[in-house]
Image (cartoon, grey):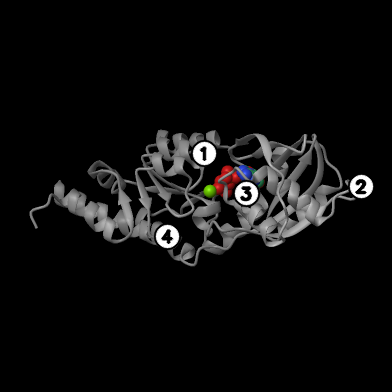
Amino acid sequence: STMPPLLSAIANAGRRGVLAKSAVVMERLGQIDLVALDKTGTLTEGTPRVTDIRPLPGTGLDEDGLLTLAAAAEHPSEHPLARAVVDAARQRGLHLPEATDFSSTPGEGVTATVEGRTVQVGSPSRLLTTTSSHDKVVAELEDTGRTGVAILRDGAVVGVLGIADRLRPDAAATVAALTELTGRTPVLLTGDNERAALRLAAEVGITDVRAGLLPQDKVAAVKAWEAEGRRVLVVGDGVNDAPALAAAHSGIAMGKAGSDLALETADAVVVRDELATIPSIVQLSRTARRLVI
Ligand code: ADP
Ligand code: MG
């Protein structure tokens, strides 16, 4: 055809299930030499399920009571963990009281007023500063690769949820292909706890794991690599990934589980929900670049 190589690369990427927003995007993708992958929703399927419901003794809450509180507060959130909590409550047929004053903090969790009380749901390491009986429960959950979620009512912890997500079936093959393409094993950047992150990373062949990161920590990691002359590709799905997607040489968002902000910020979007399309379009971009130059 007479189409310029980078435009036909866009068309080609589209056929493979990746929407690139411009020809410049394709050109830059061909230059990357380090890949940073997000965990939840990127390496994993992004459809996590609640596996454990642990109300703390003395709170007056049973499993349904704890789940109702957590799901009411999470209802307005688009985070994959929030959807898991709300789905679990629906499956038990629980009635959810309305939440007001909702706010969310990327990489941490949510806060809302439920029946006149302040409810916080999120990362145990971020929300719980003092140690107590819930610590053992959280450690036990995280050692099995689960994400522990803490629930606080008026500032006091009332229970913990365990949430598990499956690795994408093509995660290990994608990591191997990206390693081959860039000469360096991808790095995992996650807001989740280190125990769960290390366990999951080991299953796909990743050893460099940066856990417990806030959105700005992901940006700092990317900027440090780029200051060393690396050209970084960030792959993510969440609101928490958007600043890193914007800061990186190239940013790709996972379309299906992806938040609106990540999709808007990224240079390209994986619309067919397959991680393995990423190495294939990096390869495509390299070939197109050679034809242009
Ligand atoms: P990742 O980087 O792995 O995609 P996030 O940065 O989105 O993870 O979230 C990091 C951590 O923050 C989660 O593991 C969880 O503990 C907590 N968190 C963030 N948002 C929520 C939420 N809506 N509900 C519960 N926990 C949350
Ligand atoms: Mg994510």
Work out whether residue 53 or residue 173 is closer to the camera in this orientation and state it. Answer: 53
Crowd tier of the residue under label 1, counting other residues whose Cα lies within 10 Å: few below 14, some 14–19, many 20 or above: many
Instruction: Report the disc number at residue 259.
Output: none
Q: How far apart in space, not on screen, are marks 1 and 4 (Cα)?
A: 23 Å
Instruction: Report the disc number at residue 58.
Output: 2
CB within 8 Å, label 3 to label 4:
no
Report helix, strand or loop for mark 1. Answer: helix
Give the residue at x 7% y 54%.
2
Mark 1 or mark 4, earlier in chain: 1
Badge 3 residue CB within 8 Å of ligand 1:
yes
Crowd tier of the residue under label 2, counting other residues whose Cα lies within 10 Å: few below 14, some 14–19, many 20 or above: few
Instruction: Report the disc number at residue 82.
Output: 3
Image location (x, y in percent) of residue 138: 76, 51
Report helix, strand or loop for mark 3. Answer: helix
Q: How far apart in space, not on screen, are marks 4 and 2 (Cα)?
A: 44 Å
Image location (x, y in percent) of residue 201: 56, 57
Q: How far apart in space, not on screen, are marks 1 and 2 (Cα)?
A: 39 Å
Which residue is identified by label 1? Answer: 218
Image height of 280 relative to 10, above or below: below
Which residue is identified by label 4? Answer: 273
Name the quadrant where ligand 1 sits: top right
Question: Mark 1 belongs to which amino acid?
Answer: Lys
Work out whether residue 2 or residue 272 is closer to the camera in this orientation and state it. Answer: 272
Residue 57 seen: yes
Give the residue at x 92% y 47%.
58
Work out whether residue 247 or residue 84 is closer to the camera in this orientation and state it. Answer: 84
Residue 122 seen: no
Report helix, strand or loop for mark 4. Answer: loop
